[in-house]
Image (cartoon, helix red, strand yellow):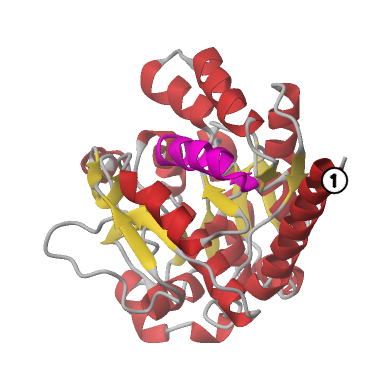
Amino acid sequence: MTESFPPDVNGVAHCALQTARHLVDRGHAPVVVAPAPAPGHKPDANAPCPVVHVPSLPLPGYPQVRVALPSRRLAATLIEHRADVVHLASPFVLGVRGMAAAARLGTPAVAVYQTDLAGYARTYMGAGEAAAWRRIRSVHGAADLTLAPSSAALRDLETHGVPRVELWPRGVDTERFRPDRRDEALRRELAPNGELIVGYVGRLAPEKQVELLAGACGLEGVRVVVVGDGPSRPGLEQALPGAVFLGRRTGDDLARVFASFDVFAHTGPFETFCQTVQEAMASGLPVVAPAAGGPLDLVAHGRTGLLVPPRDATAVRDAVRALAADAGLRAAFGAAGRATVEGRTWAAVGDQLIGHYANVLAARRTAVAA
């Protein structure tokens, strides 16, 4: 079950749907519990399995994303489906109800840690990290297994006392995101004077710190292109002079935009994984990213991109300047990045997940027998 939806604008939901698709491909029978779409929007017709919708509300400042509300429909779905394992994607509210329902039914639960709630508390409230970690420890401590998407996330969980944690990364669609989707007509539209295109893709919200690209906007011969939407967009349009804002893009259109960049820059320091970095690497792009969280696992500094100190606009600018000045370096980093992610398909990580499920079920059977 996933706390947020839809998958085309929400990474947690995207991962949940990709997981469900792989389970179906492997002969399993998943059902997804997800927030109902916004009024007037039809459910995803391409869902790989049944999707049970629970009541939802829009995420404040970002109405495209729907957040689930607690519902009796959840427990009824688990009983009707007779699940062997309950998979909780980034549990917080709905997931807590799911955990409790699984416990009542004697069904093992696997909780996936995907959102840095402590970092969000620091960003939005200036406090509350300790309370956020108490909540995370309480929720994930009740699970049979917690899966962390990166080494940094795993260390954070273990440091804060969360038990039974294993690593489970994310996959990337290497067929959709690939270098040969580069579109010269789009490039001429975005950079009519032949500028080097530096792209950002993601939610436009305070925790993403996209304003750190301001220095790159001031570099001669560089065009910053921002893809995404969110509550910070009006302020960013003022903070990033000369940047092109494309709004939300999805599917093959997004892949075409990715491949048409020259450099990908990510600025957020609170990423437990950072899916857009993987998509950029699959698209053959050199990456600039903060040396924090998920990017530490994804970007090999000096081989596939450049890691910079978090929250350092000058370092972001200097990294972009170095890549802008060296086409050979950009090509080498991009080729190495593509080679690095070619084995990280959703099928590969989906099989890893099934292995985690099998281990949890075996452990539960052993405990019952004892």
Residue 133 % position (x, y): 57, 21
For disc 1, the marked residue is: 369
Residue 303 visible at all: yes
Q: Which residues are magenta?
A: 92-111
- Describe residue 331's horizontal placement relative to residue 90 as left or right: right
- Is 149 in the magenta? no
Q: In the current view of this chain or complex, which residue is farthest to the front?
A: 369
Q: Is residue 291 above or below residue 359?
A: above
Q: Is residue 95 above or below residue 255?
A: above
Task: Return the residue nearer the eye: 74 or 190.
Answer: 74
Amino acid type indicated by mark 1? Ala
Residue 291 % position (x, y): 67, 39
Residue 63 % position (x, y): 22, 48
Q: Is residue 204 above or below residue 197?
A: above
- Describe residue 113's horizontal placement relative to residue 14 as left or right: right
Res 245 → quadrant? bottom left
Q: Residue at x 40, y 62 (%)?
A: 7
- Is 108 in the magenta? yes
Residue 204 % position (x, y): 34, 45
What secondary structure is found at the residue carrying circle 1? helix
Q: Residue at x 36, y 59 (%)?
A: 9
Q: Residue at x 68, y 46 (%)?
A: 147
Residue 201 visible at all: no
Q: Residue at x 70, y 28 (%)?
A: 162
Res 102 → quadrant? top right
Q: In the current view of this chain or complex, which residue is farthest to the left?
A: 40
Task: Return the residue nearer the eye: 321 or 34.
Answer: 34
Res 250 → quadrant? bottom left
